[in-house]
Amino acid sequence: MPDPSAPRPAPILVVDDDQRNVRLMESILRTQGYPVVRAYDGEEALRLIDAEKPDLVLLDVMMPKMSGFEVCQRLKGRYETRLLPVIMVTALNALEDKVQALEIGADDFLSKPINKVELLAKVRATLRVKSLQDEVERQKKELEERNQELIRIQGFKESMTQMVVHDLKNPLAGIMGNIQLIQMQRSEMTEAKLEELLTRTQESSRQLMRMIVNILDIGKLEEQKMPIHLEPVQLHAVVRDNVAELTSLSARDGIRLESRVRPDLPAVRADRELVSRVVANLLNNAFKHTPSGGEVVVDAQQEGDDLVLTVRDTGEGIPEDLQPYIFDKFVAGESVAGRRRMYDSGLGLTFCKLVVQSHRGRIWIKSRPGEGTTVFVSLPMRGPASEAAAPGVSGGGLAGASAA
């Protein structure tokens, strides 16, 4: 019994102005399982070819309105139908008529009166050739698509490499510059100035290390090879430690940094180090796009069986056209706030997304250009069912990020 879900095979188009010939060829073909459509003149045939996309055309030569020769010539002259096989069905036996048909692209001939054995033999042979042509065309198209994909990937790799190298160079240049200043001015440098340069060097070192570790760990998370060590994690303590690290940066750049995460919130079952790095990435991203005089606020609330962490800034916001892609790799908006750039290759938010997904959580944003951005991270308090079931450890699939 045929599979009703299988695609319907392409039909054979029978074209003849004599209805008796059409019925005869249709009957022979249908008894062998070939689907058939009919046309009684050349113009109708061309319309049906566009609509039905047949595998083969049995085409009468002598027809009113448009001869079979003209129909064949039009088909072979169009790119879309140039490979459509055409068998000319004719009572003409003159050599010049057959030569003319071959010159305009006919694939074979069938003489009237129709012989059943000859008809079926030529149909089978022509369809075999058509099947081979279709396979060649399919492989050609596939190769062209792969070639275009390789070209795209190569261009992406080149731009990615330039972006990563450029961003790694920036904090490294800061470290080298600060060390050079210390060496040059060591004898006359005040204790306060030395402390400031050392603090900046430490900040640049952290940024550099964060970028390198993100690059390494994103690959592990995508391949689900990142080990996840589950334990009860108090978000209040994780946020407190990260806020403390940014206190000096907050004071220097005139950004008010506040944690509103309550210590009495339930713990989440998660990997403490990975969650801490998520918070650090979100805070650094918020600082990057918040001008002096702005604020960054971290909060968390229990919603059912989840804890939802929010990091809100009063920066320039994210352009609407960028928002659907903000968690993709190497998507990084430039700050327009006229202040120093917190170095980021667009990997920080990608890392956050993959970590949150590996904990069966969700991450999304709400942003309005000119009014700031809020990033939401929802983590189930129970965490993954077990450490072995965590997607980063075994083969569990990653759930998609949700954008609100």
Image (cartoon, helix red, strand yellow):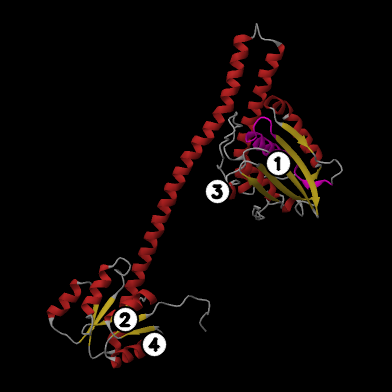
Q: Which residue is mark 4?
A: 30
Q: Disc 2 on helix, strand or loop?
A: helix
Q: Which residue is mark 2?
A: 44
Q: Nearer the viewer, residue 106 or 376?
A: 376
What range of the chain is rendered magenta? 266-294
- Asked which secondary structure carries label 4, the reply is helix
The amino acid type of the residue labelled 2 equals Glu
Looking at marks 3 and 2 on the same chain, the residue that comes earlier in the sequence is marked by 2
Please give the residue where the numbered disc 3 appears in the rendered image.
Answer: 321
58 falls in the magenta region: no
Residue 362 left/right relative to 14: right
Q: CA distance from mark 3 to mark 4?
A: 55 Å
Q: Is residue 18 left or right of residue 374?
A: left
Q: Earlier in the sequence, mark 1 or mark 3?
A: 1
**Residue indicated by mark 1:** 312
Task: From the top left corner, tell me how far across and down residue 380 is, in percent.
Answer: 77, 52
> Callout 1: 10 Å neighbours few (<14), some, many (20+)?
many
Callout 1: SS? strand
Task: Tell me the distance, in whole angstroms, between the alpha carbons under discs 2 and 1.
Answer: 65 Å
